[in-house]
Image: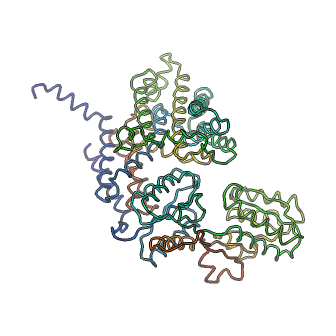
Amino acid sequence: MRWNRELLGIAIGVGLSAGLTGTSVAAEETYIPLVSKGFQHQFWQAVRSGAEQAGKDYKVKVTFEGPESEAMVDKQIDMLAAALAKKPNAIGFAALDSKAAIPLLKKAQAAKIPVVAFDSGVDSDIPVTTATTDNLAAAGLAADKMAELIGKSGEVAVVVHDQTSRTGIDRRDGFLNRIKSTYPNIKVVSVQYGGGDQLKSTEITKSILQANPNIKGIFGANEGSAIGVLNGAKEMKRKIVIIGYDSGKQQKAAIRDGSMAGAITQNPVGIGYKTVEAAVKALKGEKLPKVIDTGFYWYDKKNIDDPKIAAVLYD
Amino acid sequence: MSDPTALQRAKASLFSPSTRQKLLAFGSLVGLMVFFSVASPSFMQMDNMVGILQATAVNGVLAIGCTFVIITGGIDLSVGTLMTFCAVMAGVFLTYWGLPFPVGVAAAIFFGALSGFVSGVLIAKLKIPPFIATLGMMLLLKGLSLVISGTKPIYFNDTPEFPSISQDSLIGYFLPGLPIPNAVLILFLVAILSSLILNKTVLGSYTFALGSNEEAVRLSGVNVDRWKIIIYSLNGAICGVAGLLIASRLNSAQPALGQGYELDAIAAVVIGGTSLSGGAGTILGTIIGAFIMSVLTNGLRILSVAQEWQTVVTGVIIILAVYADLLRKRK
């Protein structure tokens, strides 16, 4: 039976060394861990690649971690705690629930570790800056494009991922406010919430189309919502103007074949890059603005292969 | 040497299957700690050790509850969302209704026990297989948490003593050098009480008996259904404690959280040597299992192992732990 234990020990060793190859941290190197809201979603992988690029450019070591789902607030706190235990020079943090993270952020502040918030803000003055998309302005641009494509009059609707998250609220309001202030002949007949779930958003879209035979266009406020709108219109065999948000394989294909008019893309690579860049600047003692706008773009069939656009899209 | 029988007996008990399993699990834990300490100077630091203890508390308590159920040969998939439901109920009592702090604590444990009771009735009386009954409860409780909270986190801002349940340190108050958070103290209290229940009470004896041979227990005239319901209710109450711990740590009840936590808890139980087919298991083993999981997660993070690989390694460890256990049983 002794060999059982040995077997386990050996196997653990092998397993660990397989995962460890080439990842140990040199002591003098500047180290900046990023704790994100997610990990598996392609959006976050794009943020990660931007952060790693900045790590190369500024010669700092960057690591990127996030919980499996955006509900796992406590797992994210554990990640932040482990990141702080490594005594980093600076830290990047996208809070799932900023109130829950305050004790640890205070600890970082006490240890003079600059915190750069990214993606969504942290309700506190601890972060030295926040690198994020101006979602209000981005959704405003979506409204402008919608108006242009439907001839500045008629009925439209919005399918949003949720009414509680910052991005959901900002994208909805950005779109609605722009329509209200600039396009008096456009009427928003329905605003519905599909949780970012493709299937649920499809059902919602079908009921909107059913109830509004004259509708000219629908804005889907995130990737899942946009795909849902697309599927719903397809199933109902209705030709409407669809505007999406973010990218992903399906959305890109729909824009190429014309079933989707276009979409707003954030710059996830830029979010990652600017976060690390801001951290490096903070370490040098440079003054930073309160918010760093990481930018957004409109893309459609015509410019989807433009290198500047292609660089920020993900599959 | 003068008393060979005593020596033999000592040897026999040292190498008895259950002792060996505990040694195996404990040896793996120590091995992991030594490995990480050598690999990174940041690992064996007070701050990080406290972090590991803190990170183990919730999963450890859930796993203790699961240990009872798994020893009976059952399973409970609802523990994660049940924990969340209890946290939300504490939020309803404390934040929505403004009731005093102890009432909120009692409410969380009461609703935990009540949900466990419902699972127990579904399994014992309606004869729904535990896997399905608790799968249903998992979804039901997840939905209820979202409905009751209006899908928004409930913050405990009006109950200043609430965060102290898990964040303050009673041990640190007496021993300033040892700032071990109360969550850990509660984990060990729950562990000791559960160990006593499992080993020293009739409830414990029936827990093992149900897992070994339910039919024999029934034929000997024991009210099997009643004991099953009691065991699931106890598990629910323990999940209520976990709900208080997590809500207190986050100073909020997060209604969307919880799904997936049951698998971590079951993994800890199994790594700790409790058999999924029932009849055997220990609380100590479960605690060691929970620590193996959090030491592994934390250590891999400290070493900055890519997250994809962290998941791979954790999976490998679970498979190895169960395989080692099987090898032991075959001998």
- The image shows residue A134 at horizontal and vertical percentages of 66, 69
- Left or right? Give the position of B263 relative to B100: left
Q: Position of residue B242 (x, y in %)?
A: 51, 39
Q: Between residues A310 and B93, which one lies in front from this camera angle?
A: B93
Question: What residue appears at the point 43 percent right and 61 percent down from the top-left corner?
Answer: B309
What residue is at 63 percent from the left and 43 percent from the top?
A: B142
The C terminus of chain A sits in image quarter: bottom right
Report whether B100 appears left or right of B273.
right
In the drawing, does residue A122 fall left or right of residue A241? Answer: left
**Residue A194 is drawn in which quadrant?**
bottom right
Query: How far across and down, in percent of the image, does residue A38 sit?
Result: 55, 60
Residue most toward the left? B2
| Vertical side of A126 occupied by A287: above or below | below
User: Does the image show residue B318?
Assistant: no
- Which quarter of the rendering shows the N terminus of chain A? top left
Residue A233 lies, in percent from the top left, at: 79, 65
* B9 over A298 or under it: above or below: above
Q: Is residue B323 visible?
A: yes
Decide: is B296 above or below A229. Answer: above
Return the residue found at the far top: B221
Color theme of the render: rainbow
Q: How many marks?
A: 0
